Image: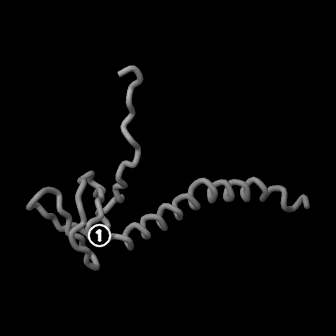
Amino acid sequence: MSDLAPLLPLVLIVLVFWLLIVRPQRKRQQQYATLQNELVPGLEVMTTSGIYAEVVTVGDQEVTLRIADGVQIRVHRQAIGQVVRPETAEPETTEGD
Protein backbone atom coordinates (compact mmCIF):
# COMPACT_ATOMS: atom_id res chain seq x y z
CA MET A 1 0.00 0.00 0.00
CA SER A 2 2.85 2.39 0.74
CA ASP A 3 4.06 1.98 -2.86
CA LEU A 4 0.85 3.56 -4.14
CA ALA A 5 0.82 6.50 -1.72
CA PRO A 6 2.97 8.80 -3.92
CA LEU A 7 0.64 8.19 -6.89
CA LEU A 8 -2.54 9.07 -5.01
CA PRO A 9 -2.25 12.88 -5.45
CA LEU A 10 -1.59 12.44 -9.18
CA VAL A 11 -4.62 10.17 -9.55
CA LEU A 12 -6.80 12.69 -7.69
CA ILE A 13 -5.59 15.54 -9.92
CA VAL A 14 -6.40 13.56 -13.06
CA LEU A 15 -9.84 12.65 -11.71
CA VAL A 16 -10.68 16.26 -10.82
CA PHE A 17 -9.42 17.44 -14.22
CA TRP A 18 -11.65 14.92 -15.97
CA LEU A 19 -14.73 15.84 -13.88
CA LEU A 20 -14.31 19.61 -14.26
CA ILE A 21 -12.93 19.99 -17.78
CA VAL A 22 -13.25 16.96 -20.06
CA ARG A 23 -16.72 15.73 -19.14
CA PRO A 24 -18.56 19.09 -19.50
CA GLN A 25 -16.73 19.81 -22.78
CA ARG A 26 -17.79 16.46 -24.22
CA LYS A 27 -21.41 17.18 -23.23
CA ARG A 28 -21.29 20.60 -24.98
CA GLN A 29 -19.88 18.98 -28.13
CA GLN A 30 -22.70 16.44 -28.19
CA GLN A 31 -25.31 19.19 -27.75
CA TYR A 32 -23.75 21.21 -30.59
CA ALA A 33 -23.72 18.16 -32.90
CA THR A 34 -27.40 17.57 -32.11
CA LEU A 35 -28.19 21.21 -32.91
CA GLN A 36 -26.39 20.94 -36.27
CA ASN A 37 -28.32 17.79 -37.20
CA GLU A 38 -31.73 19.25 -36.28
CA LEU A 39 -31.58 22.33 -38.51
CA VAL A 40 -34.74 22.59 -40.63
CA PRO A 41 -36.28 25.40 -42.69
CA GLY A 42 -38.45 27.76 -40.66
CA LEU A 43 -36.36 27.46 -37.50
CA GLU A 44 -35.22 30.72 -35.90
CA VAL A 45 -31.53 30.66 -35.03
CA MET A 46 -28.73 32.91 -33.85
CA THR A 47 -25.35 32.72 -35.54
CA THR A 48 -22.09 32.63 -33.60
CA SER A 49 -21.63 36.31 -34.56
CA GLY A 50 -24.99 37.24 -33.01
CA ILE A 51 -27.19 37.57 -36.11
CA TYR A 52 -30.78 36.44 -35.58
CA ALA A 53 -32.27 34.79 -38.65
CA GLU A 54 -34.70 32.20 -39.98
CA VAL A 55 -33.42 29.08 -41.73
CA VAL A 56 -34.52 29.00 -45.38
CA THR A 57 -32.57 26.02 -46.77
CA VAL A 58 -30.15 23.49 -45.28
CA GLY A 59 -27.35 21.91 -47.30
CA ASP A 60 -24.54 19.55 -46.41
CA GLN A 61 -22.07 22.30 -45.47
CA GLU A 62 -24.05 25.53 -45.73
CA VAL A 63 -27.30 27.08 -44.58
CA THR A 64 -29.26 29.91 -46.18
CA LEU A 65 -30.68 32.33 -43.64
CA ARG A 66 -33.28 35.10 -43.98
CA ILE A 67 -32.23 38.07 -41.87
CA ALA A 68 -34.88 40.49 -43.18
CA ASP A 69 -37.58 40.57 -45.86
CA GLY A 70 -35.80 40.00 -49.17
CA VAL A 71 -32.37 39.65 -47.52
CA GLN A 72 -30.80 36.20 -47.39
CA ILE A 73 -27.28 35.18 -46.48
CA ARG A 74 -25.44 31.91 -46.98
CA VAL A 75 -23.31 30.72 -44.04
CA HIS A 76 -21.38 27.61 -43.11
CA ARG A 77 -23.36 25.19 -40.97
CA GLN A 78 -20.97 25.65 -38.05
CA ALA A 79 -21.82 29.36 -37.96
CA ILE A 80 -25.16 28.49 -36.34
CA GLY A 81 -24.64 29.03 -32.61
CA GLN A 82 -28.03 28.27 -31.14
CA VAL A 83 -31.72 27.82 -31.81
CA VAL A 84 -33.86 30.68 -30.57
CA ARG A 85 -36.75 29.36 -28.53
CA PRO A 86 -39.92 31.48 -28.52
CA GLU A 87 -40.72 33.12 -25.20
CA THR A 88 -43.59 31.30 -23.52
CA ALA A 89 -43.83 33.44 -20.40
CA GLU A 90 -46.61 35.98 -20.26
CA PRO A 91 -45.66 39.62 -19.63
CA GLU A 92 -45.77 40.60 -15.99
CA THR A 93 -48.52 42.95 -14.90
CA THR A 94 -48.18 45.37 -12.04
CA GLU A 95 -50.71 45.23 -9.26
CA GLY A 96 -52.94 48.22 -8.75
CA ASP A 97 -53.20 49.28 -12.40
Which residue corresponds to mark 1?
A: 77
**Left or right of 55 in this view: 86:** right
Left/right placement of residue 55 relative to residue 84 reads: left
* Residue that appears at 14% across and 56% down: 68
Quadrant housing residue 89: top left
Q: Position of residue 66 (x, y in %)?
A: 17, 62
Q: Residue furthest front?
A: 97
Name the residue located 35 percent from the left edge and 53 percent from the top edge.
86
Within 10 angstroms of label 1, few (less than 14), some, or many (20 or more) residues? some
**Residue farthest to the top?**
96
Residue found at the very far bottom of the displayed protein: 60
Work out which quarter of the rendered image holds the N terminus and state it: bottom right
Asked whether, in this view, residue 78 is left or right of residue 32, the answer is: left
Disc 1, SS: helix
- How many numbered markers are drawn? 1
Q: Vertically, is 37 above or below 88?
A: below
Decide which of 74, 44 is in the foreground and name it. 44
Quadrant for the C terminus, please: top left
Residue 85 spot, x, y in % from top left: 37, 55
Residue 58 against residue 73 in the figure, above or below? below
Residue at image location 51% in from the left, 60% down from the top: 25
Q: Residue at x 30, y 64 (%)?
A: 43
Residue 20: image location, x then y, percent: 60, 53
Q: Quadrant of residue 40?
A: bottom left
- Colour mode? one colour
Residue 70 is situated, as x and y percent measured from the top left of the image, at 8, 61
**Which residue reaches farthest right?**
1
Residue 89 vs 58, above or below: the answer is above
Q: Quadrant of residue 63?
A: bottom left
Q: Amino acid at mark 1?
A: Arg
Q: Left or right: where does residue 36 sit relative to residue 60? A: right
